[in-house]
């Protein structure tokens, strides 16, 4: 193939949704190549127990032992999951949570979860910067609507409140 290795997952994702031309990928690129692989915990290091759930859900949650509690024996970390009514889904969710928790304790800011949060933070900062740039450009053009979207609603409410007739007491 003529493309570098880093584009292969992107190309596969693009062809899965119907894009056959690698030029039209645009924003489809994923950050999977930048994230480290998930931590795999050996089964002998985990003590698993099934508990009766609690909270909303009524009889289906309270009578069945579908909640899963995992204890990592070397560190003593405990994770409980009752996200669904399915025991097998709760087992996989609890294993993923335990792996994330262990990796966070072990690697700190280099963990997979921390890197995901960093990517999310950068995307949000970029979005905010783009919005500021847009409204700054509108202000320079002399457009009437120069307020940012989140502020415009407040300005209209303040204006309506100040123009409303005051009640006599």
Image (spheres, rainbow, N blue to C red):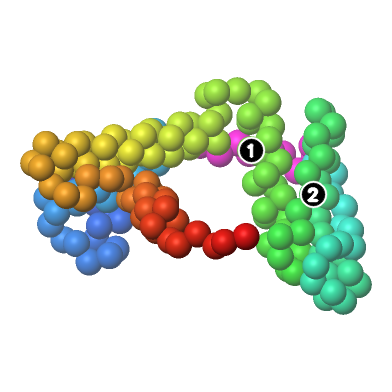
- Residue at 69% of width from left, 32% of height from top? 102
Q: Earlier in the sequence, mark 1 or mark 2?
A: 2
Residue 39 painted magenta: yes
Q: For the residue labelled by badge 1, is the local secondary structure a helix, a strand or a loop?
A: helix
Q: CA distance from mark 1 to mark 2?
A: 13 Å
> Which residue occupies 30% across, 45% down?
148
Which region is colored magenta? 35-45
Instruction: Please tell me whether residue 38 belongs to the stretch shown in magenta.
Output: yes
**Location of residue 162 in the rendering, given as x and y in whole percent from the top left corner:** 42, 53
Figure check: 33 above or below 94: above
Tag 1 and tag 2, C-beta contact below 8 Å? no
Return the x and y of residue 75 as percentages of the image width and height. 81, 28
Percent x, y for residue 80? Answer: 79, 49
Res. 118 mark: none
For the residue pair 31 and 142, the one nearer the viewer reads as 142
The residue located at (33%, 38%) in the rendering is 128
Residue shown at the point (83%, 63%) measured from the top left: 55
- Image quarter hosting the C terminus: bottom right
Residue tagged by mark 1? 100
The residue tagged with tag 2: helix, strand or loop?
strand
Could one spot residue 94 in this view of the protein? yes
Residue at the disc numbered 2: 80
Q: Position of residue 72 (x, y in %)?
A: 80, 36
Q: Is residue 100 above or below residue 66?
A: above
């Amino acid at each position: 193939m003529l493309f570098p290795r880093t584009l292969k997952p992107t190309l596969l994702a693009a062809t899965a949704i119907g894009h056959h031309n690698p030029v039209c990928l645009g924003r489809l690129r994923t950050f999977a190549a930048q994230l480290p692989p998930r931590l795999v915990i050996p089964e002998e290091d985990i003590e698993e127990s099934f508990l009766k759930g609690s909270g909303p859900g009524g009889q289906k949650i309270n009578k069945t032992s579908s909640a899963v509690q995992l204890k990592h024996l070397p560190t003593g970390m405990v994770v409980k999951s009752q996200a669904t009514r399915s025991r097998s889904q709760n087992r996989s969710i609890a294993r993923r949570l335990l792996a994330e928790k262990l990796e966070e304790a072990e690697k700190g800011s280099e963990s997979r979860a921390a890197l995901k949060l960093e990517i999310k933070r950068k995307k949000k900062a970029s979005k905010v910067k783009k919005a500021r740039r847009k409204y700054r450009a509108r202000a320079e053009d002399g457009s009437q609507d120069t307020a940012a979207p989140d502020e415009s609603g407040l300005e209209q409410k303040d204006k309506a409140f100040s123009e409303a007739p005051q009640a006599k007491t």
